Structure formats: C-alpha cells, structure tokens
Amino acid sequence: MHKTSVLSGRRALPPNISNAEEDEVPAMEMTALVPRGVNLKDFLEVKEVHMFKGDQDVNKQEHHTDKYYHPKLIVRRGQPFLIQIDFNRPYNPEKDQFWVEYLIGRYPQQNKGTYIPIPLVEELQSGTWGAKITWKEDSSIRLSIMSAPTCIVGKFRLYVAVLTPYGILRTKRNPETDTYILFNPWCPEDSVFLDDEKEREEYVLNDLGVVFHGDINNIKSRSWNYGQFEEGILDACLHLMDRAKLDLSGRGNPVKISRVGSAVINAKDDEGVVAGSWDNIYAYGVAPSAWTGSVDILLEYHSSGTPVRYGQCWVFAGVFNTFLRCIGIPGRIVTNYSSAHDNDANLQLDVFVDEDGKVDPKLTKDSIWNYHCWNEAWMTRPDLPIGFGGWQVVDSTPQENSDGMYRCGPASVQAIKHGHVCFQFDAPFVFAEVNSDIVYSKAVKDGTRVIEHIDKTHIGKLILTKEIGSDGTKDITEQYKFQEGTEEERLALETALMYGIKKQTTQDTMEQAGTDVDMDFQVENAILGSDFKVTVTFRNNSHNHYTATAYLSGNIVFYTGVTKNEFKSHTFDVTLEPLASKISEVLIKSGEYMSQLLEQASLHFFVTARLNETKKILAKQKTSVLQIPKLHIKVPGEKVVGKEMSVIVEFTNPLNQKLVNVLVRLDGPGLLRTTSKMFREIPKNSTLTWEEKCFPRQAGVRKLIASLNCDALRHVYGELDLEVERKPLV
C-alpha cells in the first residue's frame, strides 16, 4: 500500500496552520476558450496597486499602526482603509467587473475565512467585508475597504481579479501589497474593544512597562522594553501561532490565541520561546535577571527556532505582553505578592513543624512565592455566561499541567473574585494562588498532626499592576478578591468550594484554642553586604508566668519560596512576666549570608517558640529582600533625532570582594538596539564606566534601561527618562 499525504478520512484538505506558507494562485482562470483575434489586453488590466503604507499615510495614522517599524501595510480589523488601483484605461462600471481578494495560508477556503473575495458595494457596512469606490480620476480609482471585525489576524496576500467573458484574470503575486490585519481595541464590534482612550494608549500602544518584584514589605520595580513595534517583532509574533499549530481559522479568536500563547511562550513540552531555570545556574545562556526586554528574545527565537535560555516569571510575562500588544490584544503584567503554589489545589498550604517547633522540610511540600508575575488580557468571553468578559488571567510560567500542556488561562478575573471557578480555563489554580490559607501543623511522633495555627491573610496580600500613564503602582487586589473577613469574601470561598475546589481538614486537626501569648518579629531594612537585626517581640496577655524556648532559622531562598540552605540557626530562652512584653534581638552578620546569597537577595526567616508550661507552639514567617545597589545612566550631550548621542553607564562595586565576568546590558526603544558588554573584573569599591554612542530614531519622552549581572550580584538595574527633540527644520 503506497502512502499518500497524511489526510484523515474526515477532511479533504490538510490542516491550515501556517501563516508563512502560501499556495500559488492562478493568474488566469479560464472558463472558455479565447477565440482567435481576441486580445486579453483589451480587457481591464491592473497596472499598479498603491497601499498608502507609509508611517505618515492615512492608513497607519488612522489605524494606530504608525509606530510599527515595518514597510508593509498594517491595519486593524473592523475599520476601513484606503488603497488605489491604477488600470490600463478608465474603469467603466457598465462593462468592467473587478474585485479585490485577500488570502492567507496554503489552502484558502471561503467558509474558513482564509479566502476573502471583497464585493464592491454602494455603502460600507460595519460587521462585514466590503469595498467602496471613493474617488475616480483618469485610469485610477481609490477603494475604501472595510474588513470584518471577526476576521483572522495575520498576514494576508492581496490580489485584484478582473472578470472577462472567458474567465478571470488576476494580478501576479506581489509581496509589496501584503496586508497585516490586527485586533482592533478601537472598534466596538471587535471582541477586544476597550472603550477608554487612555487605557488603549497604555495597554496596546505603550512599548515600555514596569515589572514589580521584591516582596510585600519591600516592593521593587524595574522597567521592561516590550518593543512590540520594533523591526521584526510583528513577524516573530505571528510565527508563534504557526509554532503553536493554531489553525488559521481560529486566529480571529482572542480566547484561543491567548490560550495557545500561554503554552508557546514557555519551552516546556512544545519547544516554545523561553526555557525556564530556577536553580541559579545559567551556563550557556543569559541569566533571567539580565534581560531588559522582549526584543532580543523574540528575534532570537524567530531566527533559531530553539528555546532562548533563560527565563523566570517576569521574563515569561514580559514576552507574553509583547505578543499580546503586538497583535492588538490589550495586555498588562500583574504581580501577586505572597503567591501560593498549591501543589494539590486544596486551598491550603501546609507547613509542618516538629515537636521542637522546627520546620520539617520533608513534609512541607507547597511553596509561597515572594511574588509571581502573570498577564491579564482584555477580551469578551462569549464562551462564558454574561458578566465574565474583561480582564482574563493568562500565565505562561510553566507551573502546572492544563489539558496536557504547561499553560494557564484565560481565566476570568471576575469569576475568580466571586469564586465561580467552574468556568474555563484553569480558574481553580489562580483562585488558590490568591486565596489559600497557610496551615501550621505539628507532626507528632505517633503520626497524628495537630493544627497549631491558621493564617488566612498571608496569601495574595497585594496584587499590583502599572499605573496608566506613569511608572507608579496600581493596586488591583480588590478586582481579585473581596476584603479579608467580609461576608462577600466568605461567600466567594464557599462558592469555590461548592464548585469542587477541595479544602480538606485532616482528622484530629482541630486548631487549638486562643493563646495567652502573642509573638511577632521585624527584620531591619538592610543594604546588601551589611549587618542587620531581627527583633522578636513577645506579649503575655495573661496573669500567668511563662518561660519559652525560641528558635530563629534564617534561610537563603529562591523568590519561589524554595529554600536553598540555612545560614543562621539561633536558639534563645525567654522569660515572660504577666501582662508584659519582652523584646529579643538577633544580630545577622553579613559574613553569614553573603557567600551563599542567591540572585534576588532574598532571605526568609522562621521564628518558632514553645511555651514550656503548656507545650503550645507559636510560629511566624517573613521574607526580607536586601537593598541592591543601582546602576547610574547619564546622557551628557544633546538629544536630537538622527544626531549622535552619548550614553554613559556607571556602577560602583559595594561588596567586600571583587566582581568577575560582569555583563552589562543597555536598552532603549527608539534610541538604540539592545547592546551588551562584558567586564572581566571590578575590584571592590571601584567604579565601572561604559560609554556607548547611538542615533535616536524617535522624538518625545524615551527611556534607557540598563542591567548588570555576575555570579555574585544579580538584579542590578538602572534607568533614565529623557526627552529627545525633533530634528530642527533647516
């Protein structure tokens, strides 16, 4: 039996999953023999098609696509655009018949939306394709073409077809007339319509963003260059949908696109864009903290086809946001502080301590990330009941498997807030990330477990995104959850439980009654490389006299809450007088933590105390992020479009050791292409200076972003806002 092309019995054509591939379209489709003496040249013939595709031309201006550094026509769906056709003679509507065709992919079919013959109409109608003649002069006409607000998003090929008595004559394939059609948040019929101009400017047109990181007590921010308009990025983003094998007919649907996007941005299971690494070893790749934006990553992936190393959550979120904004879906990065990674989705993070109050790492499996970044994409959800459109969580960090792949979302933020976790996709996982309780249990030698304390407010304490029009924070916690302790909050939790999120309570685990003694501790705000104090406060609320054995454990942790090792272990005894407070201080010396520090300078403290008289255990945990020194950027000379500009990056080594193999990156959309330089060593207390020349391309307020990376020091950033002047008119 010989093997033919792989077609299933149900389908006449192979799947149409590539925007890049194309089929030849016949220039002549003859339906009858041409008699002798008839010259086809006598019929209407197309000489040239003008696309008005310059940055200053009407199409790109009206469609808000003038920022794309791209020579072809780029328009948004559901909104008219203009083209001009020059014929060999004046067009006569009485006897000439022609139409414009758009095709995409290899197997164009009208019912799939991949072959679109556009009819000539008297008046354009919103919601449907049509072409109206708006101007005629000599042998030329201008057409206003309206696209459907639901059409496929991608790169289309344009043909003009002329009907003759003997068949159809078509223009030849001309890449110059290719047209990119994107989502249109300005169009009320588009499923990504956003009705606020300021929001559209921020969530679609802003090519710079801010990522919030650090921890809840020490919020840090860094700029990220999305670069969705930079050269090559639009094609790289369309290529991702080809890589994800998304059928072209599904590429008008933001729900499908954002779901496959959340899978293809990470390299797990599909050789996607970014390979994740959380182990602090980044040989043969770039450390996640060194990236300053998405452009290098997407261009490298587009040209090499292999995953780019390495990323962590903010890198996945940054690249995903570029993808969303580039194709026209409003998108933003969100940071959830104290984010639960609940391995068994039981809305409960279990921390087990032994009988002495020390944490048992073998039993404690769930982790709390200091912060976790994901994306929100704006769209309607016709697949869900009314009211669940708007912002949707999509997360491309590979954490858990969803329908056989590492992906997450889109999950309606509104559904998460109200506990309606039955609605697709992955709402239970996101609900747990912002709503879990931390349960401290004592594992007793006989195998029983006694709940000592439940912390209901530690997880999902603060959810932030960038403020519209500034680099400040916008607190959106209320969009994800009702205020702790309110009736609505309990109701949302009960709804989630009803819809099948399990919340187990293990037998014999009743939380013990209220306590006579409270304990809390504070970590002093410290700069990397300095000594600092941890202050533990006990308050005895009873008339009894108590003694306690307390234990402080200091750990170096990844920002994902996973412990690398313990650097401080300190036991101390406390005597508690009735109705009195007692303060104990523990000194942490820089030598104890510096040699083992991980890149985000994140320290995690557990303080547990056992009251000797009652055997009651008190437990508290906190994360502290040390202050990391900054890079300084200066631009001493003039800042004018097209004129050479000098950028100086400076950094002083604050550590008590020399830094080796220091990589510095510099980035600035509209100013310069991302560039980097390696410095072999920076002795202690000495300053590195690097000068780079560039020619600014865009006027207005621009931003320079720099990062510094070496094994001893990561997450060192600097940025500078500057005003670039237009070229003076001579």
Image (spheres, rainbow, N blue to C red):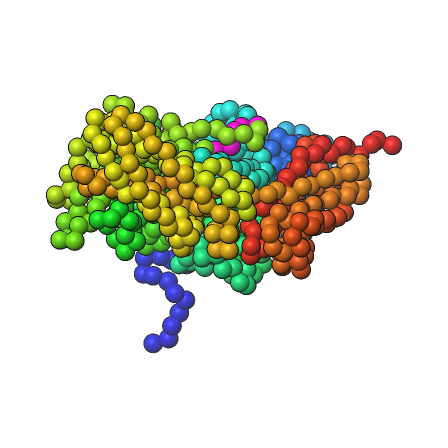
Instruction: Say how many tags the image has.
Output: 0
Residue 206 location, quadrant: top right
Q: Position of residue 374 (x, y in %)?
A: 43, 41
Q: Could you say which is closer to the camera, residue 463 or residue 523?
A: 523
The residue at 25%/53% (across/down) is 363
Single out the residue that lies furthest toward the bottom.
1
The residue at 70%/45% (across/down) is 649
Horizontal side of 546 relative to 278 (left or right) equals left
Principal secondary structure, stretch drawn in magenta: loop
Q: Could you say which is closer to the camera, residue 112 or residue 245?
A: 245
Question: Considering only vertical position in the picture, is 220 above or below 564?
Answer: above
Residue 639 location, quadrant: top right
The residue at 32%/33% (across/down) is 538
Q: Position of residue 579 (x, y in %)?
A: 27, 25
Question: Considering only vertical position in the picture, is 2 above or below 555?
Answer: below
Q: Write down the region rendered in magenta.
A: 465-469
Q: Quadrant of the N terminus?
A: bottom left
The residue at 33%/44% (across/down) is 572
Q: Position of residue 670 (x, y in %)?
A: 68, 41
Horizontal side of 484 relative to 691 (left or right) equals left
Residue 376 location, quadrant: top left
Residue 195: within the magenta? no
Residue 257 visible within the image? no
Q: Quadrant of the C terminus?
A: top right
Q: Could you say which is closer to the camera, residue 19 or residue 200?
A: 200
Q: Position of residue 687 (x, y in %)?
A: 70, 48
Q: Could you say which is closer to the camera, residue 431 or residue 406?
A: 431
Horizontal side of 420 relative to 526 (left or right) equals left
Residue 649 visible within the image? yes
